Structures are given as C-alpha cells and as structure tokens.
Amino acid sequence: MNRQTACRIELCPPGTHGDQIHAVLRELRTALDRPTFERRWRHQHQDYGYDVVVAWLDQEVAGVMGMRPVATLSRGAFLHIDDLVTRHDCQRRGIGKALVCWAEAWAMEHGLGAVFLDSREEALPFYQHIGYAPLGSVLVWKILGAPTV
C-alpha cells in the first residue's frame, strides 16, 4: 500500500481487466485501439516477457505500467518500464511512484540490477524526484512500414 493513496498493485495476465487497462493507457497512447492493444499485449507477453502492472483504487484502475526484462551487451540485464500512466483524475496521489517502486522491487527479486525507461520531457521532473537521472542518450527511430503484430 502507498502512504498517500491506498492503492493495490497487481500483475495482470493478458486479457484480464482489458477494458479498464486500455481506457487508462489511452490517456497516453491515444492512437492505440482496443484490438491492437490486446493483440500486442498477448504477443509481447508471450515472446518478450512483457507484463502489465495495475494500480487499483477500490475497484477501478488508477494507473498502468508495462515492463519487461531486457539484457544487452552494454547494460547487462535490466528491467525496462514501458507506458507508465496514471489516470488523469488520480495524478499527484503517489500512484506512479507506487508503480515504479513495485517495479524496482520486482527487478531486484529477479536479479536485475537497474531500471531503464523512456520519458516524455514533461514527465522528467517526476522521474528525477523519485531518483532517476537522464542518461544522456538520444532516442532515434525509423519507421519501416506497418507493424505485423
């Protein structure tokens, strides 16, 4: 439980609570429709170990976080956090921090020595407040065509 807001954190298998989880994710990923979300969630869970973690306030989803273990030559094994979002009307109540703390504990329990994530510029103060520092790399990308999954 979180001291600011009594929330419950739960790992959700693909397909569970999909309507509520998708509704919260849409606040961050506005173009992500429900069928694409469900398909990608199942695929990424099965093939990449991606999990969805939910913060509950009573019976409602207040926050959502995707996470996956990753290993690279340069960084070794670490946890990557994807798509951390707190429902707009629940922000500034400790939900995001509770989700990140849960992820950090999970990472340590699974022998992962670091947590990485990509942040929007406007969210950077939140991450810095809870002890994260900008890495200094620049994210670049190139779209190769329509995704198959």
Image (cartoon, rainbow, N blue to C red):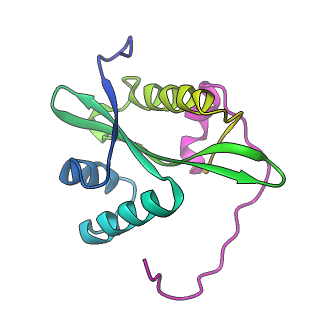
Residue 73 on image: x %, y %: 82, 55
| Residue at image location 52% in from the left, 25% down from the top | 101
Residue 51 on image: x %, y %: 43, 48
Report the side of 65 relative to 103 (left or right).
left
Is residue 66 magenta-colored?
no
Q: Which residue ends up furthest to the bottom in the rendered image?
A: 145
Q: Nearer the viewer, residue 109 or 134?
A: 109
Q: Is residue 51 above or below residue 41?
A: above
The quarter of the displayed image where residue 37 is located: bottom left
Q: Is residue 71 above or below residue 42?
A: above
Q: Is residue 23 above or below residue 1?
A: below
The quarter of the displayed image where residue 116 is located: top right
How many numbered marks are there? 0
Q: Which residue ends up furthest to the left in the rendered image?
A: 59
Q: Which residues are magenta?
A: 120-149
Secondary structure, magenta segment, majority class = loop
| Residue at image location 42% in from the left, 77% down from the top | 149
| Residue at image location 37% in from the left, 60% down from the top | 41
